[in-house]
Amino acid sequence: MAARFAVGDRVAVRRAFPLGHIRTPYYARGAVGDVERICGAFGNPEELAFGRRDGPKQTLYRVRFAQTVLWPDYDGPPGDTIDIELYEHWLEPATE
């Protein structure tokens, strides 16, 4: 499976709120960051949590966000970042 995004691409986290086991942090939904690394392809944890093991593997990315993007009240140094590992089905190209 080829990765949809490359290192350095700007991506947005889908703004979705499905029920069930979700590995994507609530606070990151809708945020825009940069792909820092492609971690590989793995079983989708949202499916694995329900015992469904035969689905396609999903590419996992490490995405870097400015702290102020996730927490507008963040009062640390302006260059501070946080990395979050997110599966491809949660990402879309950033429009900004």
Image (spheres, grey):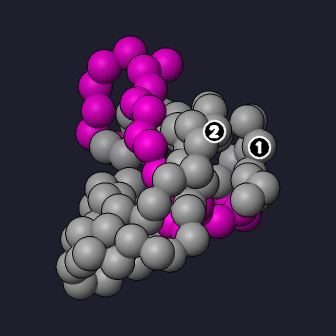
Q: Name the residue under label 1.
A: 6
Where is residue 70? Give x, y as percent: 37, 46
What are the residue bounds of the magenta stretch?
A: 72-96
Where is residue 53? Give x, y as percent: 39, 71
Q: Mark 2 points at which residue?
A: 38
At a point 28% along the width and 25% down the height, the residue shown is 75
The magenta stretch spans residue 26 = no
As shown in the figure, which amino acid type bears the numbered disc 2?
Ile
Decide if residue 96 is in sight here: no
Number of numbered discs present? 2
At a point 73% along the width and 53% down the height, the residue shown is 3
Q: Distance between the residues labelled 1 and 2?
A: 7 Å
Instruction: Mark 1 or mark 2: name the one nearer the start of the chain.
Output: 1
Which secondary structure lies at badge 2? Answer: strand
Mark 1–mark 2 CB contact (< 8 Å): yes
Decide if residue 25 is in sight here: yes
